Image (cartoon, helix red, strand yellow):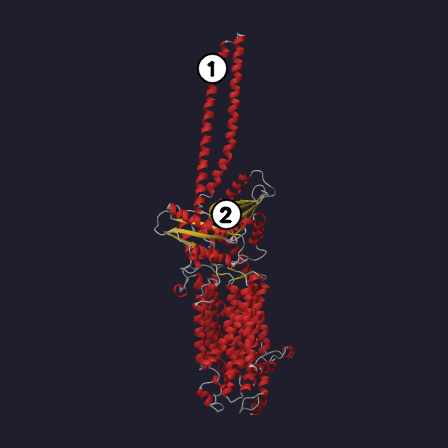
């Protein structure tokens, strides 16, 4: 592979403008494809086969009107007084005007609904009064009949011997009996009428705490019901509704709307990400010392990430893609794109300073450092593609998009920098360096091993520090962010808090409970009462309201308002209890759906697959490093270090986002559960990046050892030769990932923090402190490999040592000659 990359680098150097034009055309095509074929990104996640997915499919089939996205619109008076008649009319007119928008199926007017509830209660009260009056009249009639019967019985006794009088009394008796039957019929009618009245009253009592207008009359919540689900609803439809609501002018009324309407992709790149790039540029400038040198990795990275992300988003119209999916590609594409280009450019820079010919240096840098870049990129790609083993579609897609972006970053790194380096020429170096090209500058002193006591102390302190930082991970709780996690100045956050304050926290995360009967029922109202009664008995249930009934009368839907929000422990427990209920009387089975239920299912599924994915990643880590380093202990040390840095990243994320530590620094105003797919994404990405740093540092140690340097001194030699570029690369990655900590997209922030902290600990604590210390302690045995295994393993020349033998630096002996000299001495 080294020879192929060498030739590719020479070819790109001979045709720099063509290479640049190729990637610019690729970028233009990707952007055009995105604008012409790109679809909608969603903020929700679903996993086929979960209980929520099954109930949702039933709802879509039986009650399609409940299958679309529903967004909440919160209206609140600015003066804290109840809505005036004019304000109520303004709210109603605004919502009614939304019906004409594309993909809006219906709207819910809060004042109309609240009035309907009031009217229903009044109708029930009037009906109950009529029943009570009727009962009173019947009771009075029965008293009259009883009195008449008593008189008639007395008269019968008095005229016992008078047949004519008895015949007349018999006729009166028939009249009394007829009146009694009429009263019985009237009473039966009242019983028939009072039964649905009582059932209706029960249903209203179950839902009495559900309101659309607050008790103080200052707040109202409307609903915009879309005809499409989260993934198929076009962004243009959301934007149109959001624009209408955002520009509404109702005097004295503030209008806010929830994330279902406010969702947008505008926050993919924001000030935080740009700041990260600026920091990366400063690091490059400090290392490369020239503005041209600084610009080359940035240009390569931006072109590569543009091709990858725009190309990936072009497929969002074909596959269901979450909003965080392209952001992961953006994060990885920027970070590895800069680093990979830096590795090649820095190698070329060193060779230029040694006096190597420009074209030869470009080709050799591409064949040596480029080979390491290809291998490092391959490990990241494999780790990301391995996300497909989880069996979770949206997670596999995230891995695929991230892998594509990394693959493009690798392709750009081994082609575009070579062409750009040809255009820049020796101006890559400073004037002082150009003046000293080819001179024999001071030689480095022979490497000396670190003191053993220092290795022991370093290893102990590094392990202890990582374990302490990882401790919060033991209490990790997974979930998806709700409206409280949005920026405090966002309309979604204000809507969440307004609803919470005026209507209760649970209204922000209602459950949708389905009820399936074995056969169509005759008495729908009685069935609804029986089901609602059972649901309302459950702990942490605030209210239950019938939502819809299928035309077949064998499928019912209910809205259940929990006591707490959608990410709370009590709501999770409530979902578990409802699902565990045995069939109700008559064989009625219950199911639970809704955003809170879906989030619980996604989190549980991800928690279940974490161990499998960890085994796959660790297994890959061991296999790859055994092949590359031809050792058993080095892979074990490296993998143990990776696990420590991974859990340290978990601990940092839990401490900040779940516990609220340093909340003011990271903008965490409402701590909650950790983003449910963050651990598995961190696991895959950090594995690939850890292998990058392991390769660039430990391969130098192995090279020194193979060339005759004692094992412990070789550790120092490899660390000395590789730490400068690894330090710069790690700082760049931390800066890029850290910029996403302040992203406008809520779900991106914990990913940015976890990756930044993970890279920080892995590069500076694990790879530069812990791994060298442990390798020093093991000494020569760290490179032991059974002979039978050594014979069957392929010989992977990652850094192109064979290429270096045939292309030595000016003024140095070929590698083979140096090895002979080392042996003879």
Viewer-proximal residue, 287 or 680? 287
Q: Quadrant of residue 9?
A: bottom right
Q: Please state, as top left, top right, bottom left or bottom right, where the N terminus lies in the image.
A: bottom right
**Whole-percent x and y of residue 443?**
48, 89
What SS does tag 2 mark?
strand
* Image coordinates for residue 817, horizontal then vertical, percent: 58, 91
Q: In the rendered view, would you say 712 is above or below 239?
A: below
Residue 712 visible in the current orientation: no
Q: Distance between the residues labelled 2 and 1?
A: 59 Å
Q: In this view, does 673 lie above or below 444?
A: above
**In-front residue for pair 658/667:** 667
Nearer-the-camera pick, 682 or 86: 86
Left or right: 256, with 607 as reference point: left
- On the image, the x and y values in percent for residue 415 come to 56, 78
Quadrant in the picture for residue 625: bottom right
- The tag earlier along the polypeptide, 2 or 1, is 1
The percent position of residue 662, horizontal first and vertical second, equals 40, 65
Res 79 label: none
In the figure, residue 454 lies in which quadrant?
Answer: bottom left
Of badges 2 and 1, the one in the foreground is 2
State the quadrant of the C terminus. Answer: bottom right
**Secondary structure beneath disc 1?**
helix
Are dots 2 and 1 in contact, CB under 8 Å?
no
Q: Callout 1: 10 Å neighbours few (<14), some, many (20+)?
A: few
Residue at 53% across, 43% down: 531
Can residue 188 be seen here?
yes
Q: Is residue 59 left or right of residue 732?
A: right
User: Which residue lies under the disc numbered 1?
Assistant: 151
The label number, if any, that marks residue 559 in the structure image? 2
User: Dot 2, crowdedness within 10 Å: few (<14), some or many (≥20)?
Assistant: many
């Amino acid at each position: 592979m080294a020879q192929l990359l060498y030739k590719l680098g020479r070819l790109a150097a001979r045709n720099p403008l063509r290479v640049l034009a190729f990637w610019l055309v690729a970028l233009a095509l990707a952007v055009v494809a995105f604008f012409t074929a790109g679809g909608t990104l969603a903020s929700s996640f679903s996993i086929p086969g979960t209980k929520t997915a099954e109930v949702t499919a039933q709802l879509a089939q039986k009650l399609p009107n409940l299958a679309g996205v529903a967004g909440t619109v919160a209206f609140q008076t600015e003066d804290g007084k109840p809505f005036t008649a004019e304000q109520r009319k303004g709210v109603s007119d605004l919502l009614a005007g939304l019906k004409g928008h594309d993909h809006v199926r219906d709207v819910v007017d809060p004042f109309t609904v609240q009035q309907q509830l009031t009217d229903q209660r009044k109708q029930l009260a009037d009906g109950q009064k009529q029943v009570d009056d009727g009962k009173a009249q019947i009771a009075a009639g029965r008293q009259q009949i009883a009195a008449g019967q008593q008189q008639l019985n007395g008269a019968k006794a008095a005229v016992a011997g008078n047949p004519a009088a008895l015949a007349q009394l018999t006729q009166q008796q028939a009249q009394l009996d007829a009146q009694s039957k009429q009263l019985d019929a009237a009473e039966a009618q009242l019983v028939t009428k009072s039964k649905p009245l009582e059932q209706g009253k029960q249903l209203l009592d179950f839902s009495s705490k559900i309101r659309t207008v607050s008790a103080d009359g200052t707040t109202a919540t409307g609903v915009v019901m879309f005809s499409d689900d989260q993934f198929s609803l076009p962004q243009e439809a959301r934007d149109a509704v959001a624009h209408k609501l955002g520009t509404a002018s109702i005097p004295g009324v503030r209008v806010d709307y929830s994330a279902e309407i406010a969702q947008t992709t505008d926050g993919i790149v924001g000030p935080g990400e740009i700041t990260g790039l600026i920091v990366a540029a400063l690091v490059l400038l400090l290392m490369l010392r020239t503005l041209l040198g600084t610009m080359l990795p940035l240009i390569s990275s931006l072109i590569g990430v543009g091709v990858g992300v725009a190309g990936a988003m072009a497929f969002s119209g074909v596959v269901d893609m979450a909003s965080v999916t392209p952001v992961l590609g953006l994060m990885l594409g920027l970070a590895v794109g800069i680093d990979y280009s830096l590795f090649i450019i820095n190698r070329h820079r060193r060779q230029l300073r040694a006096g190597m010919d420009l074209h030869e240096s470009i080709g050799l840098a591409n064949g040596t450092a480029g080979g390491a870049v290809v291998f490092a990129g391959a490990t990241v790609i494999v780790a990301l593609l391995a996300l497909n083993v989880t069996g979770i579609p949206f997670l596999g897609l995230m891995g695929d998009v991230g892998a594509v972006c990394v693959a493009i970053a690798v392709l750009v790194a081994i082609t575009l920098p070579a062409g750009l380096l040809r255009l820049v020429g020796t101006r890559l170096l400073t004037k002082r360096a150009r003046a000293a090209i080819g001179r024999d500058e001071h030689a480095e002193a022979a490497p000396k091993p670190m003191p053993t006591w220092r290795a022991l102390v370093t290893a102990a302190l590094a392990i202890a520090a990582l374990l302490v930082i990882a401790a919060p991970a033991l209490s990790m709780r997974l979930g998806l962010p709700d409206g409280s996690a949005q920026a405090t100045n966002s309309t979604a956050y204000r809507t969440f808090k307004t609803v919470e304050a005026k209507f209760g926290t649970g209204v922000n995360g209602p459950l949708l409970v389905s009820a399936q009967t074995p056969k169509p029922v005759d008495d729908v109202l009685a069935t609804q009462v029986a089901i609602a009664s059972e649901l309302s008995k459950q702990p942490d249930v605030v209210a239950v309201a019938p939502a819809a009934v299928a035309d077949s009368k064998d499928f019912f839907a209910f809205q259940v308002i929990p006591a707490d929000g959608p990410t709370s422990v009590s709501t999770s427990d409530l979902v578990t209890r409802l699902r565990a209920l045995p069939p109700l009387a008559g064989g009625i089975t219950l199911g639970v759906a809704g955003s809170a239920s879906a989030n619980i299912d996604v989190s549980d599924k991800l928690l279940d697959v974490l161990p499998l994915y960890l085994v796959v990643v660790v297994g890959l880590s061991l296999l790859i490093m055994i092949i590359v380093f031809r050792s058993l202990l080095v892979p074990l040390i490296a993998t143990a270090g990776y696990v420590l840095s991974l859990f340290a990243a978990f601990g940092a994320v839990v401490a900040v986002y779940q516990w609220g530590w340093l909340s003011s620094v990271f903008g965490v105003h409402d701590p909650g559960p950790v983003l449910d797919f963050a651990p598995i994404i961190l696991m895959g990405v950090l594995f690939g990046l850890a292998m990058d740093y392991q390769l660039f540092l430990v391969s130098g140690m192995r090279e020194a050892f193979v060339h005759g340097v004692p094992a412990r001194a070789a550790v120092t030699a490899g660390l000395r030769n590789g730490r400068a570029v690894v330090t710069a690369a790690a700082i760049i990655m931390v800066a890029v990932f850290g910029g996403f900590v302040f992203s406008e997209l809520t779900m991106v922030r914990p990913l940015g923090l976890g990756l930044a902290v993970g890279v920080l600990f892995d590069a500076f604590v694990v790879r530069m402190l812990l791994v060298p210390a442990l390798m020093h302690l093991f000494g020569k045995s760290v490179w032991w490999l059974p002979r039978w295994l050594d014979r069957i393993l392929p010989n992977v020349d990652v850094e192109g040592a064979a290429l270096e033998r045939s292309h030595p630096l000016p003024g140095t002996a070929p590698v083979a000659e140096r090895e002979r000299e080392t042996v003879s001495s």
